[in-house]
Image (cartoon, rainbow, N blue to C red):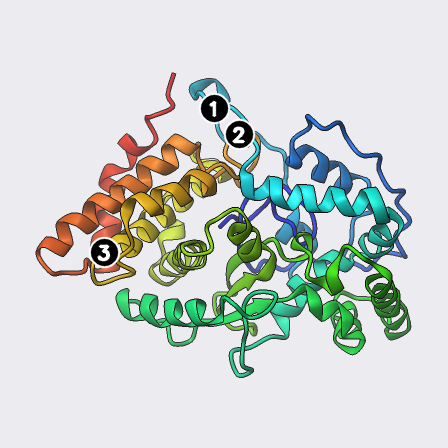
Amino acid sequence: MLRKSLALGSCLVASMAVVACQEQTTQPVATPTAASPARTSATASPQAYLLTLWANRAALSVPSSVLSVEKVFAESGRQAINQNDYVCSEQNSPVVQYMYDELYGTLAKESSLFFSIYNIYGDIIPTYDALYFQTSATPQTYGYNGQFTNVVLNTERDVKSFWDIKSDDIQVVAMHGSMLLDQKRVAKTYVLLGFSPTVAAAYAKTIYDALSASNTMNGGNFAFFTFNAFAFTTFGGSVPDKIVMGDGILESYAAIGFGDVAPQAVFAHEFAHHIQFENGYFGDLASNRYSEGEQTRYTELMADAYAAYYLTHSRGAAMNQKRVEQFHDVFFQIGDCSFKSDGHHGTPNQRRAAADFGFKLAAEAQKQGQILTSDAFHDLFVAAYPTLIEPDAR
């Protein structure tokens, strides 16, 4: 969903990430030794606490052949949108709060075990494993116990047939925190990130021992490790186009009561980014007059609209609009007021306006029994965009 997130490791609390591969020449760092930061007050936002964790850990650099951690997880901090133009209040999204509470529970009881994993970047290993090593050639399961497998597979089939872009080459893979118990697989990923085989094996053993001793991180089935879903393309690179669905984000939405809609909605949004990749819409605002934050907001609101159209169209997911709106009330709260972030998605009101635009088009189209082409939808969105970003203007 965004190119640069608020956060850390596999927990991209600014919402699910859209990643475009941009190589950066870097060198691996020595074993990180950052001290474990103190827990913030109970009133602090999840974003503030997780940013504190990230800031207290040494930066990891990776070989130029690998998508850098900074590109996947960092936030530049440049002003993206003029905050004075909009009314927006921060609030903890229930889904982020769920993950946050689970994390705090572990820190209260087993902080040493958690930081033995976190301080050697173990939390980002599932992301890179899914991105670089998992393919659709291997049977995929979704959810800690595979409970979301059928809905994700069915949604993949339906979304690909609904939209008119070439999509047979888009691979859909799962991201499992439980892979952290597979020492060979973990070590392989560390080597990818630039660590020597000896260090990689030692780190893999450290993670295995910590998870085996933990009573709260459930063998890696811990939302913090896989709280993410993202679309990925290298625009002709060696890694296939992918949609990565993390167990943590699916399980967290299910825990707060949205297991019936979240997998379809998250997938539909990520697929919309592949529509943008395929049709070149990321270049719509490719001008120096637009900040990266404005460009991100534009593509995110467009993805919200595409997803809402599919989810409620009678020939799409045919979901009840009110139920989708309830999900969006939670979904749109994540990372919503991050005006200083290049990954700012738009305020909740702007995102709701984009979704409402998709709902309206779906209602109109299905009366005629038609599905708009991706280009036709795009053109209508572009025409409406100025009004969609007005709701929060002062």
Residue 177 position by quadrant:
bottom right
| Mark-to-mark CA distance, 3 and 2 | 32 Å
Q: Up-down: is 333 above or below 121?
A: above
Q: Nearest to the eye among marks 3 and 2: give it.
A: 3
Residue 101: image location, x then y, percent: 68, 41
Place of residue 247 in the rendered image (x, y in percent of width and height, measured from the top left): 59, 61
Residue at x 13% of width, y 48% of height: 364
Task: Give the residue type that dot 1 points to.
Answer: Cys
Earlier along the polypeptide chain: callout 3 or callout 2?
Answer: 3
Residue that label 1 marks: 88
State the separation of the CA atoms marked 2 and 1. Answer: 10 Å
Q: Which residue is mark 2?
A: 339
Residue pointed to by mark 3: 313
Residue found at x 25% / y 41%:
357
The amino acid type of the residue labelled 2 equals Phe
Q: Residue 189: x percent and y percent?
A: 74, 70
| Dot placed on the residue nearer the N-terminal end, 2 or 1 | 1
- Quarter of image, res 40: top right
View extreme (left): residue:
368
Q: Which mark is residue 262?
A: none
**Label pair 2/1, CB-CB below 8 angstroms:** yes
Viewer-nearest of discs 3 and 1: 3
Residue 164 relative to residue 328: left or right: left
